[in-house]
Image (tube, helix red, strand yellow):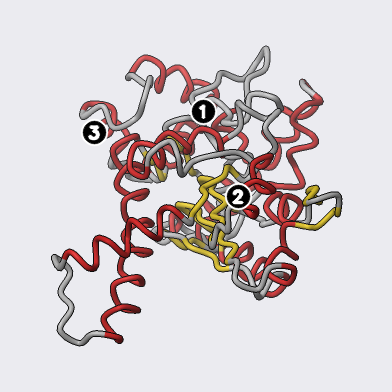
Amino acid sequence: MSRDNLYEKFIECNWWIDVDKRRANSWIQNFGQDKDIGKLILDNIFFYNNEQLNSYTKNIINQIKGEIFQKHQLKNCKLFKDDPYYFDQWNIYKQNLKVIPATIPSDASGSAYQVMPRYRSILGSDVVSDIYSIEEAIDNQIKELIFVDDFSGSGNQLKKFIEKEINVHGKLIKICDLPNEFTDLTVTIAVYVIHIKALKLLNDKFPKIKIRYIDLIDEKFDLLNDKCIFYNKLTEEKRAHIIEFIINTRENIISKDEKYKKLMQYQLNIPIVFSHGCPNNALMLLYAKTNNWRQIFKLGDDEI
């Protein structure tokens, strides 16, 4: 199997946070005689560094700005994007907006809280808040709540969060039911990357909630799928060998440390990494750390 060793180029240009050649080569040693499998995985990692995530945050905000412009342009065909009227409308919109991490406050180390500073730097501290501020926001006639995170893989964690009950004036209301209780309130989920399974689950389950995202991925990036696009140039025999190796290695990791067992329900086996760590849907071999398996990237949720 020919190797491009693209991962070395990513390391040389400092695209991967806290990963140098020594760390990468140490991780590849985990694979023994199958080092080409480790190199193939590293060559195909989706790594989102700080600069890229900052750009994605601006992109999501610009989606909203564009919709506001289009809405008001329909009312005034002479309106241009540099018109002061447009900027006034954007400022009014921000006064009626709250951006909230899609998790509970006690999970301050989670990925949702990791993305909050990016929104705060663009929208300001007055716009960014936490889940306990929803009642106050509703009292202040807030028109849109945007719940943010970095990635949704299976959609199950976001579903669990959206179905969480919050206390509004003594009444317990699920977040997903807020648009029914307050008809002028828009509830939005914004993530940088989403799996097509998660998108379908959230759209089907919560039709009144808007989903914003930048990148859409699917099962073609699953390393346990023999149709994975990373295997395009490989024989069926080689594909089967890689899949068997990953499955056996994952089982060995779980046998060494039980904490990884509960992550199996989220596994999509995708080589995806953010600057603050791997989502729990990522390929376990990337973030696992046992007495006989070296880690290359940390897990984004330190509580697991």
Locate the N terminus and report the quarter of the image it occupies.
top left
Q: Please state which of the two labelled residues, at mark 2 or mark 3, is closer to the viewer.
A: 2
Query: Label 1 vs label 2: CA separation?
Result: 58 Å
Residue type at mark 1 is Gln
Q: Quadrant of residue 106?
A: top right
Q: Viewed as shown, does residue 221 lie left or right of 169?
A: left
The image shows residue 230 at horizontal and vertical percentages of 43, 54
The image shows residue 52 at horizontal and vertical percentages of 31, 43
Q: Residue at x 70, y 47 (%)?
A: 266
Q: How dense is the environment of label 3, judged by Cα within 10 Å: few (below 14), some, or many (20 and up)?
A: few
Residue type at mark 3 is Lys
Q: Which mark is residue 33?
A: 1
Q: Quadrant of residue 110?
A: top right
Write down the residue under mark 2: 137
Q: Which mark is residue 9?
A: 3
Most distant residue in the front direction: 140
Q: How dense is the environment of label 2, judged by Cα within 10 Å: few (below 14), some, or many (20 and up)?
A: some
Q: Give whichever of 129, 196 is nearer the camera.
A: 129
Q: Please state which of the two labelled residues, at mark 1 or mark 2, is closer to the viewer.
A: 2
